[in-house]
Image (cartoon, rainbow, N blue to C red):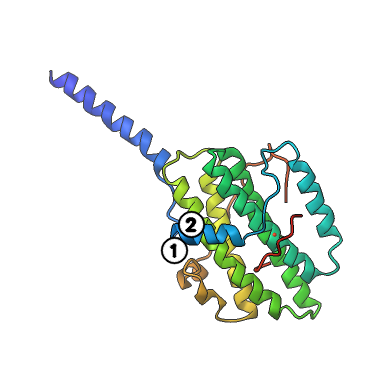
Amino acid sequence: MRFVSACLLVFLVFLITAILPVFAHEDHSLPEATEGQINEALAKTAPLRFLPSHSLYFVISLKEKINRFFQPSSLERAKFDFVVSGKRLKESYILLSQNDVRRASRALVDYSKRLTKMNEQIEKARSQNQDVAVVTFEIAEGLRNHEVLLYAISKKWELIGDSYNFDENLSLSVLRFIETVKVLDNIKPGIKDRFKTATSAAFERKPTPTPSPASSEFPETSSTARPKRIIY
């Protein structure tokens, strides 16, 4: 009887240790948002014509690439990249609501990449002595919606087992968000104080090298702080 009890105990311990990692998601320390704030953030983000699951989505991706190519300056490309980044975040939220974890994870990868491109264009515009003050303020205002959507995505993800590197890609998205706030804060000191996610600890912490998210199986796809109601 003791032997059976011992075997049962070992089995239960093994079962618990096997299940916990599935539901143990990283704490991203994002400020809480109400359902009303989430809906408002979705409404203020650039509208979507097609989701990545649509057969004609490749047309949207192609159009975005062409539109970006013809942006007349680094500053305009930065504004364009911000609009597109918001679309990727919105896509991730909607796709996750539809339990399409694979495409939702891919959208987060594209969001991170787009923020990186935007930051590069902002720095390039500064090096060319372009006036980035107004754009910096507009992007900072729009990032508030991003912070809300990142929280909404993380809450939806809490009860879902990790797959398609979603947890890793969400963590990277939050990191890129914080890095973007830091870039803007370097231009206009005090901007970071608007974002609870961008705490002083987050800025002082040197992030460990993050491997590129595993996403080669998907084609790369590619929104301004007060987004224009334009569908690219």
Q: Residue 151: which numbered mark, if any?
A: 2
* Amino acid at circle 1: Pro
Quarter-of-image position of residue 231: bottom right
Does the CB distance between marks 1 and 2 fall below 8 Å? yes
- Residue drawn where x is 28% and y is 26% of the image: 11
Residue at which label 1 appears:
31
Secondary structure of the residue carrying tag 2 is: helix
Above or below for 166 versus 147 = above
Residue 105 versus residue 156: which sits nearer the camera? Answer: 156
Instruction: Report the quarter where the C terminus lies.
Output: bottom right
Viewer can see residue 212: no
The residue lying furthest to the left in this view is 1
Residue 99 horizontal side relative to residue 124, left or right? left
Distance from the alpha carbon under mark 1 to that under mark 2: 7 Å
* Amino acid at circle 2: Tyr
Viewer can see residue 6: yes
Above or below for 190 versus 109 = below
The tag earlier along the polypeptide, 1 or 2, is 1
Residue 5 versus residue 168: which sits nearer the camera? Answer: 168
Secondary structure of the residue carrying tag 1 is: loop
Above or below for 32 versus 216 = below
What is the x, y in percent for residue 218?
69, 39
Q: Residues within 10 Å of mark 1 (few under 14, many from 20)?
A: few
Instruction: Report the quarter where the N terminus lies.
Output: top left
- Residue drawn where x is 65% and y is 41% of the image: 215
- Residue drawn where x is 81% and y is 59% of the image: 68
Residue 232 horizontal side relative to residue 171, left or right? right
What is the x, y in percent for residue 74?
80, 69
